[in-house]
Image: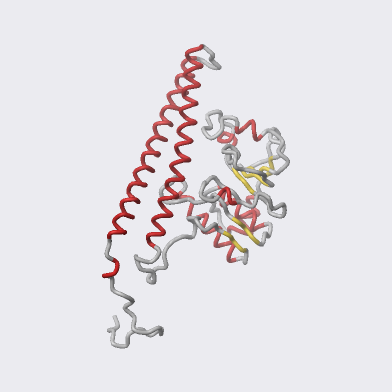
């Protein structure tokens, strides 16, 4: 399964003909997809057919083309020849166990489990705390847990942010913390590049609309063209704010790394246990 995140999307086994490649939404736009065996577009018709799709204004047209692989959707649509109805009730009853799926990733995982795949590899999925996808993360990790609980091998790339964290009560601040900071910084920098590219596309769209207005090439009324431009400018401003936020987070992590490097960890106390048994110190008082 391949998502948008630049941290690992290029690591997918594109050249292995025995491995299925599942993609989603507009991941074909950046140009890194080399092949695909299945596609997922689980949004409503109103969503996937909209002309103001900032990721790809021609996405609906792309869906109507023949690609030679199934595109899983909420329904089969006559104008989309590759569309296949997603077996929602079947995966809820036999896999998820409840009506709980907060992203297309969740539907992809559920179908792979339902069809009995023995190994699932995940590339380009992060769902970090500082992105709009953070609310989707609990469900994503839930579905990974469901797969592992059924004996399915789930592969996550080394830099993947899913299922990442500390071992509560066992790990010290000085063990692996700096490496985690460096990883977070790199992920932020990757995100910064992606968000900057999105901002650039938005700016190009605004300039194109302005050119249409100035040259009188109107596909609708002048007022509608101006309103469309106004909306694009609003979205661009939001994107610029998001980009500024990412830049600020990079500076913050860099500052933490600098503070970490200056901290005298050699003064930290060592392991407070006297032995390796499970009984602990016999002289300690019991709460």
Give the camera-side residue of 87 and 221: 221
**In this rendering, position of residue 13 left or right of residue 161:** right
Q: Position of residue 56 (x, y in %)?
A: 56, 33
- Residue at 41% in and 58% down: 180
The answer to which quarter of the image holds residue 219 is top right
Q: Position of residue 9 (x, y in %)?
A: 56, 48
Q: Quadrant of the C terminus?
A: bottom left
Which residue, as the protein is rendered here, is positioned at the far top?
Answer: 216
Which residue, as the protein is rendered here, is positioned at the far bottom?
Answer: 282
**Number of marks present in the image shown:** 0
Against 268, residue 90 (above or below) is: above
**In this rendering, position of residue 86 left or right of residue 157:** right
**In this rendering, position of residue 20 left or right of residue 242:** right
Q: How is the image coloured?
A: secondary structure
Q: Position of residue 18 (x, y in %)?
A: 72, 55
- Residue at 66% in and 41% down: 75
- Residue at 33% in and 76% down: 271
Give the camera-side residue of 113 and 78: 113
Against 134, residue 224 (above or below) is: above
- Residue at 64% in and 60% down: 119
Q: Position of residue 166 (x, y in %)?
A: 41, 64
The answer to which quarter of the image holds residue 265 is bottom left
Give the camera-side residue of 163 and 255: 255
């Amino acid at each position: 399964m391949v998502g948008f995140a630049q941290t690992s999307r290029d690591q997918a086994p594109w050249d292995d003909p025995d491995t299925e490649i599942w993609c989603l939404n507009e991941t074909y736009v950046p140009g890194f997809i080399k092949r695909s065996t299945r596609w997922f577009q689980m949004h409503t018709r109103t969503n996937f057919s909209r002309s103001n799709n900032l990721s790809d204004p021609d996405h609906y047209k792309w869906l109507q083309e023949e690609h030679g692989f199934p595109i899983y959707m909420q329904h089969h649509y006559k104008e989309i020849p590759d569309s296949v109805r997603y077996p929602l009730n079947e995966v809820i009853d036999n896999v998820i166990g409840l009506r709980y799926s907060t992203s297309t990733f969740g539907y992809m995982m559920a179908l792979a489990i339902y069809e009995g795949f023995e190994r699932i590899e995940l590339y380009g999925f992060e769902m970090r705390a500082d992105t709009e996808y953070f609310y989707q993360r609990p469900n994503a990790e839930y579905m990974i847990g469901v797969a592992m609980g059924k004996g399915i091998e789930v592969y996550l790339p080394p830099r993947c942010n899913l299922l990442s964290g500390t071992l509560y009560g066992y790990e010290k601040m000085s063990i692996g913390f700096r490496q985690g900071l460096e990883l977070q910084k790199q992920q932020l920098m990757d995100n910064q590049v992606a968000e900057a590219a999105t901002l650039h596309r938005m700016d190009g769209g605004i300039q194109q609309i302005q050119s249409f207005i100035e040259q009188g090439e109107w596909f609708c009324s002048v007022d509608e063209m101006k309103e469309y431009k106004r909306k694009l400018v609003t979205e661009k401003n939001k994107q610029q704010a998001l980009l500024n936020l990412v830049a600020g987070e990079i500076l913050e992590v860099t500052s933490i790394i600098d503070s970490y490097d200056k901290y005298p960890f050699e003064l930290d106390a060592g392991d407070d246990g006297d032995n390796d048994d499970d009984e602990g110190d016999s002289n300690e008082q019991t709460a």
